[in-house]
Structure formats: C-alpha cells, structure tokens
Image: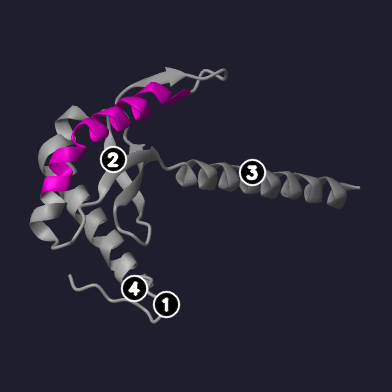
Amino acid sequence: MKKSKSSDGKIDSRRISRVEQEIQSIVSLYIIQNLQAELPGLVTIGRVRVPGDLRTANIYVSLLNIRTVEDDSNGKKVPSGKELEKALKTLQAWSKDMQDAINKKLQMKYLPKLTFFADESTEKILRIEKILSHMSTTEKVSGIADDEN
C-alpha cells in the first residue's frame, strides 16, 4: 500500500480505515481457518482500531455461542466470563502468526502489533434493549391500568 499523506504530514484517514478493514478481514479468516476448535465459542471481531503511525492494531472481540455457561442469580444460564478471558489469551498467544498472515497480504513499512480486547459494545446494546423492552412493557401495563380507572 502506498502511503497517502495529507498536507500536514498525517496519514490519510481513508487509508487508516482501509488498513483496519483489511486487518479485520485477515484476522477473521485466520481465526476461522486455524483457531475455531481452540476457542470456547464463535469469535466475532467488532472493530479494529489502528493509530496514525500504523504500528499497533487494537482488535475488539466478543464471543457468541459460548459452550460453557454458568447459572446467574435468577437460575438462568449465562456465558462464563472466564471463557472470554480464555479466548483473549488464546488469540494473543497466536497474534504473531496472525501478524505473519497480515504481512503476507499487506505491504506495509511497519507490521502492526496486534492486541486483543473484549468488545463490550454488544453487551451494552443488549442491556439497553432489555431496559427499553422493560420500559415498554411497564408503559403498556401502566396504560392498561389507567384505562381501567
């Protein structure tokens, strides 16, 4: 990839965005082809963030279809927090091989160092949806009670 700099010397944000997309695609493919059996569930990459110097890449992941579950206080089955931690450790352990895969596909001056983080945005969205659903149900019940009076 050719470096495209703006007049102030910073790397073009379109290039950074493209690099983020390429890294996400390459890492996703690597996980599917090489690590699926080692992970406790389906790993999804929510986003990749690369700074202007392109030397690091922060990869935010979440787990779906987690095989191990625990009972919460209400007796419902919920994913084990330990499983996400295990997945992050596994991904980090394989990060050098993923960097090699990136190096083969992208021609860059610097090979970004990969670091994996838990993507909490999915959990936040689910919590917000649950709250909104509860509010909607409460309003309906409240509306029915008002109609009866």
Looking at the rendered structure, the kind of residue marked 4 is Arg
Q: How crowded is mark 3: few (under 14 residues within 10 Å), some or many (20 or more)?
A: few
In the rendering, which numbered label is found on residue 8? 1
Label 4 sits on residue:
14
Closer to the camera, 116 or 129? 116
Label 3 sits on residue:
131
Looking at the rendered structure, the kind of residue marked 3 is Ile
Majority secondary structure in the magenta region:
helix
Looking at the rendered structure, the kind of residue marked 1 is Asp
Q: Is mark 4 on a helix, strand or loop?
A: helix
Give the magenta-colored segment's residue range.
77-100
Residue visible at 83% across and 45% down in the picture: 145
Residue visible at 24% across and 29% down in the picture: 90
Residue visible at 26% across and 54% down in the picture: 24
Is residue 23 at least partly visible in the picture? yes
**Image spot of residue 68 (x, y percent):** 33, 22
Closer to the camera, 104 or 28? 104
* Dot 3 or dot 2, earlier in sequence: 2
- The CA span between labels 4 and 1 is 15 Å
Placement of the N terminus among the 4 image quadrants: bottom left
Q: Is mark 3 on a helix, strand or loop?
A: helix
* Dot 2 or dot 1, earlier in sequence: 1
**Image spot of residue 100 (x, y percent):** 11, 47
- The CA span between labels 4 and 3 is 36 Å
